[in-house]
Image (cartoon, rainbow, N blue to C red):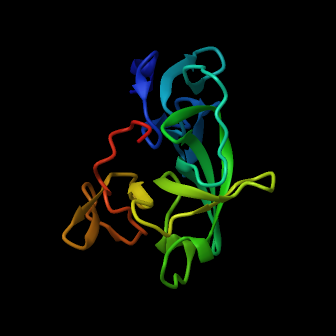
Amino acid sequence: MIKKLEGQFVVPGEKLGVVEEFMPGPGTVEVEGNVYSTQIGRASLDLNRHIVTVKTVAGPPVLPVEGSTVIGVVQNAQEKMAIINIIAVDGKTLEPPFTGMLHISSASPKFERAMSDVCKPVDIIRAKVIDDTQRIPKLTTAGHGLGVIKAFCSRCGGNLVLSGRILRCDICRNVERRRLADDFGTWTGGTN
């Protein structure tokens, strides 16, 4: 499967293969033995070193500042915070991605017990920057249009689909919970 990826356009969260085929390089992440894209770009394979990377199209530098709307890929979700790879700011793709932090207290207008109820690794979120005075921008998903815009099953990696009020995997039928954006499921891989 992965050898067909050379030069193919990929989006964050897209499964590129398994670590038995190729190890993750820049622009990718390994989650439970699967390699996923963390950014929008073109897949590139190093057949000698068995590494897959995703290269984005370069442009003028864009920075996440307070008030900016960002698109990001959840890199890691712990009990009270998540680390987010910010891939786009106000509709402009970042190169390379910035790291942002989403604390559970800024994740929802209501009380959340654990970050796993808000987002999980490889999910794609839309958030606002609420503080850019530190080295790592602080984000919020508590607001209109903010939250998870694309989610993946933590059991099998399949797409999670909203059916009524239930978020269910379209492959294994696993039911999960997330802090969803109002337009969940409509994101197609652009920077909107």
Residue pictured at 38% horizontal, 65% vertical: 180
Q: Position of residue 185 (x, y in %)?
A: 29, 53
Residue pictured at 63% horizontal, 14% vertical: 48
Q: Nearer the viewer, residue 168 or 80?
A: 80
75 lies above or below 63: below
Q: Position of residue 109 (x, y in %)?
A: 49, 78
Q: Position of residue 167 (x, y in %)?
A: 29, 67
- Residue 151 makes an appearance in the image: no
- Residue 173 makes an appearance in the image: yes
Q: Position of residue 123 (x, y in %)?
A: 47, 54
Residue pictured at 24% horizontal, 73% vertical: 165
72 lies above or below 109: above
Q: In the picture provided, is 152 more to the left or to the right than 50?
A: left
**Quarter the N terminus occupies:** top left
Quarter of the figure with residue 16: top left
145 lies above or below 72: below
- Residue extending furthest toward the front: 67
**Quarter the C terminus occupies:** top left
Q: How many marks?
A: 0
Quarter of the figure with residue 114: bottom right
Q: Nearer the viewer, residue 13 or 58?
A: 58
Q: Nearer the viewer, residue 161 or 181?
A: 181
- Residue extending furthest toward the left: 164
